[in-house]
Amino acid sequence: MPLLPMNMRTFFCFVVIALGCIDAPAKSRRIGNYDFHLSRSGHKVALIIRNAPFESSKHSHGYNENIGPLVDGRKAYGAESIPRTQIKSIVLYFDGRPIKVSRWLYSDCYNPNLESEYVKLRLARNRQTVFVTMDGADGAGAYTVVWVLKRNGRHSRFFKPAF
C-alpha cells in the first residue's frame, strides 16, 4: 500500500484528533472541586461542587421507555447510557455559615458541566435565596438544572429544557 504524501498524512491525523475532541469543551475535564463565589449587597455566597468519575459497579442502571436512562431507579439526567461523571457533593456557605444541601438535589445529575460559563449564581431580591443554574451534559442528554438554595435550608430544584 503506498504511503500518503506528508501533507495528506498530517491532514488525516488532524481530522482524527479533531473528531475525537468535538464535544470536549462542553464537559468538565477536571475531576475535583469547583468553587463559585458571589458577593452582593453585603452578602457573600460560596458554592463548592465536587465531581467524580461514575462508578458503574456501585449502581444499578436500566432504561424506561417513558423516562429514559435510569440509575438506581431514578431518571439519570445527562446520561444517554452509562454516565461518565457524577456530582459527589455540593457545599453552600452563606455569609460564612455552612448550609446543608441534601444529596437528593444532585445525585441524579450526571455528566455535569462545571466550568464557570455553565454554572451561574444569582442572589434573590430577598437576599435569603441563591439561584444556581447549571447546564449539564451535551447533545441528546443535555439538561439545565436550577437549584433554589435557601438560607433556612429548605432547598428545591427544577429542570428547564436544554433546547
Image (spheres, rainbow, N blue to C red):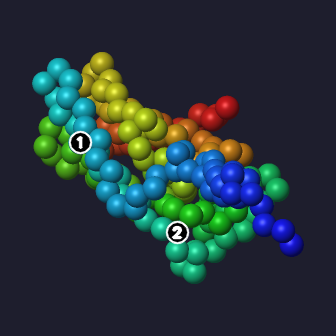
Task: In this rendered view, identify the residue nearer to me: 20 or 1.
Answer: 1
Residue 14 drawn above or below residue 46 = below
Q: Give the number of the disc on residue 88.
A: none
The residue positioned 32% from the left and 56% from the top of the image is: 33
Q: Quadrant of residue 10?
A: bottom right
Residue at the bottom extreme, as displayed: 57
Q: Looking at the figure, which quarter contains the C terminus?
A: top right
Q: Percent position (x, y) of residue 77?
A: 61, 51
Q: Percent position (x, y) of residue 152?
A: 26, 40
Left or right: residue 147 versus residue 94 is: right
Crowding at label 2, few (<14), some or many (≥20) Cα neighbours within 10 Å? some
Residue 159 visible in this rendered orientation of the protein: yes
Q: Percent position (x, y) of residue 116?
A: 38, 39
Task: In this rendered view, identify the residue nearer to me: 143 or 103.
Answer: 143
Left or right: residue 40 versus residue 111 is: left
Q: Percent position (x, y) of residue 148?
A: 40, 36
Residue 132 visible in this rendered orientation of the protein: no
Residue that numbered label 2 is attached to:
54
Residue that numbered label 1 is attached to:
46
State how far apart marks 1 and 2 are (Cα). 25 Å
Q: Quadrant of residue 81?
A: bottom right
Left or right: residue 53 versus residue 61 is: left
Task: In this rendered view, identify the residue nearer to me: 45 or 111.
Answer: 111
Q: Secondary structure at mark 1?
A: strand
The residue positioned 55% from the left and 38% from the top of the image is: 144
Q: Are marks 1 and 2 in contact (CB under 8 Å)?
A: no
Q: Looking at the figure, which quarter contains the N terminus?
A: bottom right
Of the residues shown, which amino acid type is indicated by label 1?
Ala
